[in-house]
Amino acid sequence: MRGRDRCPSAGAVRHYWAPAWSDSVETGAANDAAPDDEETTMTQTTARQTDQTTISPVPGTVHGRPPAQTHAGPHGTHHGARPATRTRRTLRFLAHLAEMVVVMVLGMMLLAPAWDVAGAALGVAALLARPDVAAVVMVADMVVAMTVWMRVRRHGWAAVGEMNAAMAAPFAVLLVLFWTGAVGAGGLMLWGHVLMVPAMAAAMLLRPAEYTEHAHGVDLAWLARRWPVLLALLLLAGTVAGGAGDVPAWLVVAMALVYPVVGVLRNQVRGRSMLVLQAAGLAVFAGVSLLAGALAGQDAGAWVLAAGLVGHGVWDVLHHRAGAVMWRWYAEACVVYDVLLAAAVLATTFGS
């Protein structure tokens, strides 16, 4: 009888329901002390049922609490809170759009001097001055700035990709018209900027809750974790200081060799499948290096070298996403280094 009267542990259900009579500290001792007679047992059972009925959840509450006391959900939303009015949602949407436009402009202003320095160092200033190349560089600046800011503001990668695609889409269409002679240099830049803002608004409409209901906050810790990117930029500056046209072909196989060597030392190359994968990757990049070396001094050699660098960048991404063989920070730095170095090789070869 005594075991049947004891309430089960409330810990298993406390997350879903409001605290019952047996959950309180005051009644803990009474719960442990068994009733001595049947009358006492019936009295406690009745009181317990009455108390549970009083505090059980009622319509309009969440977990036994009024909506104002509910927990905050993702991006700062509150489950159970009163929905924002249409006017408030519209204002939030416009504020987010204005924020994106400001970030876009700042990206162009802050990164443009870096391109001037790079163009002078690589001897490709004339190439960067071409209207079509200038438009591509400008879009790249905006994409970098937008990606960094949206990640700091805790937007997901899907939303980041949609916003970047919206910024690039008008210029992608206008560049084709420019190359066919249908649009001049002035029209390329003018209409690219004019069409970009409604394109960004359209991308935001794909996720209305993302830009009208969520308070994203700022995640500076994400920005601090991007130190491998800074390391890659410093290494890149050192590599192209003597001219990107002098990048040796053996660099591709040397970078590919780092993965299996360090993986073995870290005891991360385990099993036949991983061993075969690393050996196959090393063989492919060795072949690319040999071909690029054989074509050195020719335009085809520059294309092969650039393709090998980009291919190794893809190799970096695969390892970074899998968290396998190599440190993730190394893979992150390496992919930035590979892709930018490939661009520098092609720019130096065909722009000087």
Image (cartoon, rainbow, N blue to C red):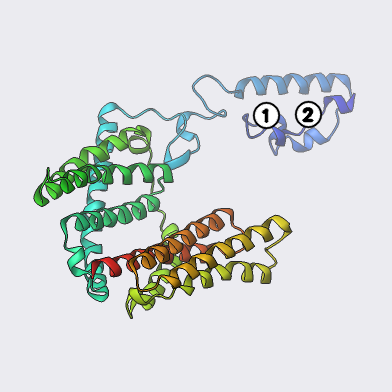
Amino acid at pointer 2: Cys
Reply above or below: 109 against 201.
Answer: below
Left or right of 207? Residue 32 is: right
Residue 173 in sight from this viewpoint? yes
Q: CA distance from mark 2 to mark 1?
A: 10 Å
Check disc 2 and report the residue beneath it.
7
Reply above or below: 290 against 310.
Answer: below
Judging depth in this view, the residue of 15 and 349 nearest the camera is 349
Check disc 1 and report the residue beneath it.
20
Judging depth in this view, the residue of 34 and 257 nearest the camera is 257
Residue 192 placed where, x, y %?
A: 18, 45
Q: Check contact, mark 2 vs mark 1: CB within 8 A.
A: yes
Residue under the image location 62 percent in, 30 percent down: 18
Left or right of 320? Residue 213 is: left
Residue under the image location 21 percent in, 43 percent down: 196
**Mark 1 burial class by Cα count in 10 Å: few <14, some 14-19, many 20+:** some
* Quadrant the C terminus occupies: bottom left
Amino acid at pointer 1: Ala
